[in-house]
Image (cartoon, helix red, strand yellow):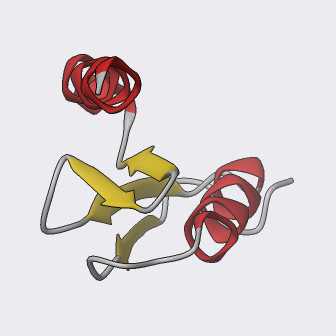
Amino acid sequence: MKHLEGKKVLIVAEELYEDLELWYPYYRLKEEGAIVTIAAPKEVVIDGHIITSRTPPDLPAFCRAIIEHFHD
């Protein structure tokens, strides 16, 4: 039995977060059965050559950011 089955967890991410700081706890919580939501100020965060997004629904904005980054 998963320890967090059905529990709701909110992860709050600031603008300049490290991927590992966000995605490691996200996937560990999901593995334990939690319903995880990520709250972040932007769909996409660009920090130098690192481009990240919050969740799969942000994929269109993420793809646009990658195209713009490599087009320049």
Q: Position of residue 10 (x, y in %)?
A: 35, 72
Q: Looking at the image, which is closer to me, 14 or 7?
A: 14
Q: Could you tell me which residue is drawn at 31 percent across and 30 percent down?
A: 62
Q: Is residue 28 left or right of residue 53?
A: right
Q: Looking at the image, which is closer to me, 24 or 48?
A: 48
Q: Could you tell me which residue is drawn at 34 percent across and 56 percent down?
A: 46
Placement of the C terminus among the 4 image quadrants: top left
Q: Position of residue 29 (x, y in %)?
A: 66, 63
Q: Position of residue 34 (x, y in %)?
A: 56, 57
Q: Is residue 49 left or right of residue 62?
A: right
Q: Is residue 39 left or right of residue 1?
A: left
* Relative height, residue 28 to residue 67 (above, below): below
Q: Could you tell me which residue is drawn at 29 percent across and 82 percent down?
A: 14
Q: Position of residue 28 (x, y in %)?
A: 76, 61
Q: Could you tell me which residue is drawn at 26 percent across and 31 percent down?
A: 65
Q: Quadrant of residue 24 in the image?
A: bottom right
Tally the numbered discs: 0
Q: State the residue lying farthest toward the front.
A: 72
Q: State the residue lying farthest toward the left.
A: 41
* Relative height, residue 21 to residue 2 (above, below): below
